Image (cartoon, rainbow, N blue to C red):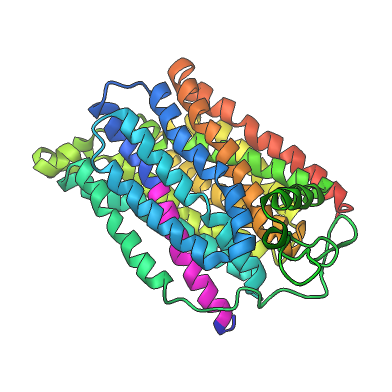
């Protein structure tokens, strides 16, 4: 990668890591909140789902703003908002205040993915490699967030831990203000070929900022009503058959991702030996009372996802992405069905099935991210990733409520069997996308 590529990947990698640091610290806090407050898994799952839903719902307006104002400003605002939300969380005395703080976090974090991914797709020449490293940085945050949170909870109250997590956002904002790069370095002005026919280019499908008679955006010339008209026109042009199928793939992934991860630390605790059996002579130490072995296994599972992100990103440059998604969805369905029997068979099978889940869950992400880039024009790339994360994190947030309900009604076995339906659905849609591409 050249200097511009590296600058963009460094900038987006840092922000991506922090977004997921906060996102995946929440399930660790969930374990504490279940004991701190008189609340059921169904109720708390719904509270968490609200924040995660806003994480997705804000992606669409975030994508529109990205196409208009560029990525740097949007990413910086994202970092500021996330820090503020965890500051509020640190003083939350009740579950409703926790819901407000998580909602603020969701809205703030929601603009990152359309802004960051649009920047990579338009500014990085080595797109597949850029997505791979970007995904790896995200998974580093995904693993680091729960690990740091779990370690801090050994020695501090959860409210103090939430306050300490504000500090990385402060540092990231300072770095973001110094980052310099060309956001459009990788855009081919002659257009990019659309996989399902025609040219997916700024000329054939211009964004609202590019449709004007005198070089200015229609929004600036004609005001908000025309901005809405341009948004609707861009959206209609964007939703080709291929893009629509890609959105269904993203939705299936989001529902499974959120459904599995939200209560996974609590679920893993039911399959692990008592802490005393693990710590031995240290079982009676003060730290042992706060030691949660399941949280560390959860961190290990997420760390394995770094390898999945790298593998998935590299595959996007070597095979058709629908084929890669078919393979990963099929494997995820198998792992979901086998997870509880394997986990109950002993510590070695539990570690193996957890590693497989972590690897596959994150290998899928760069594959669908690259697919979105193939089915959208550069001028509407922010909008396309806005719709992507509306489906992934917005609709996908329902997975938290679904898993919370299933756990409270049919237990762990029934929950994993129910969640397995999502990768089965994704497998079918990915096959349809492959056939749309002509089977190659």
The x, y position of residue 186, in whole percent, is: 68, 75
Question: Magenta part mainly helix, strand or loop?
Answer: helix
Residue 136 visible? The answer is no
**Quadrant of res 220:** bottom right
Q: Which stretch is magenta?
A: 4-23
Residue 337 visible? The answer is yes
Say which quadrant the N terminus sits in: bottom right
Say which quadrant the C terminus sits in: bottom right
Between 11 and 104, the residue placed more toward the observer is 104
Question: Is residue 18 a member of the stretch shown in magenta?
Answer: yes
Question: Is residue 5 a member of the stretch shown in magenta?
Answer: yes
User: Residue at left 23%, top 29%?
Assistant: 36
Residue 131 placement, left or right of 231: left
User: In the rendered picture of this protein, how many numbered marks are placed on residues?
Assistant: 0
Name the outermost residue toward the bottom. 3
The x, y position of residue 230, in whole percent, is: 75, 53
The x, y position of residue 360, in whole percent, is: 57, 48
């Amino acid at each position: 990668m050249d200097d511009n590529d590296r600058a963009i990947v460094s900038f987006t990698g840092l922000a991506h890591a922090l977004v997921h640091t906060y996102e995946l610290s929440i399930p660790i806090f969930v374990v504490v909140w279940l004991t701190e407050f008189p609340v059921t898994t169904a109720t708390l799952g719904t509270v968490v789902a609200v924040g995660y839903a806003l994480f997705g719902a804000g992606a669409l307006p975030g994508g529109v703003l990205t196409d208009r104002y560029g990525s740097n400003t949007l990413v910086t605002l994202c970092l500021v908002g996330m820090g503020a939300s965890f500051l509020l969380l640190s003083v939350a005395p009740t579950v409703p205040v926790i819901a407000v703080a998580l909602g603020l976090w969701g809205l703030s974090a929601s603009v990152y993915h359309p802004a960051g991914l649009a920047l990579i797709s338009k500014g990085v020449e080595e797109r597949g490699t850029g997505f791979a490293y970007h995904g790896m940085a995200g998974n580093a945050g995904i693993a680091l967030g729960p690990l740091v949170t779990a370690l801090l909870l050994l020695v501090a109250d959860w409210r103090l831990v939430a306050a300490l997590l504000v500090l990385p956002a402060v540092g990231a904002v300072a770095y973001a203000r110094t980052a310099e790069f060309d956001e459009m370095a990788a855009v081919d002005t002659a257009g990019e070929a659309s996989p399902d026919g025609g040219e997916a280019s700024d000329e054939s499908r211009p964004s609202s900022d590019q449709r004007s008679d005198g070089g200015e955006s229609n929004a600036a010339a004609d005001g908000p009503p025309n901005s809405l008209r341009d948004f609707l026109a861009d959206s209609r042009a964007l939703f080709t058959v291929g893009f629509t199928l890609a959105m269904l793939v993203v939705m299936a992934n989001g529902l499974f991702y959120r459904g599995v991860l939200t209560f996974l630390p609590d679920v893993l605790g039911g399959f692990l030996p008592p802490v005393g059996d693990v710590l031995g002579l240290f079982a009676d130490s003060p730290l042992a009372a706060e030691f949660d072995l399941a949280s560390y296994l959860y961190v290990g599972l997420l760390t394995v996802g770094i390898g999945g992100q790298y593998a998935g990103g590299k595959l996007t440059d070597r095979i058709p992405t629908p084929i890669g998604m078919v393979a990963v969805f099929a494997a995820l369905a198998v792992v979901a069905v086998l997870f509880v029997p394997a986990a109950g068979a002993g510590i070695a099978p539990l570690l193996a099935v957890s590693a497989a889940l972590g690897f596959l869950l994150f290998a899928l992400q760069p594959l669908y991210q690259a697919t979105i880039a193939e089915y959208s024009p550069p001028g509407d790339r922010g909008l396309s990733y806005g719709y992507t994360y509306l489906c992934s994190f917005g609709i996908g947030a329902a997975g938290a409520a679904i898993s919370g309900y299933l756990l409270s009604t049919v237990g762990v076995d029934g929950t994993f069997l129910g969640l397995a339906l999502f990768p089965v659905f994704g497998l079918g849609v990915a096959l349809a996308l492959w056939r749309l591409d002509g089977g190659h």
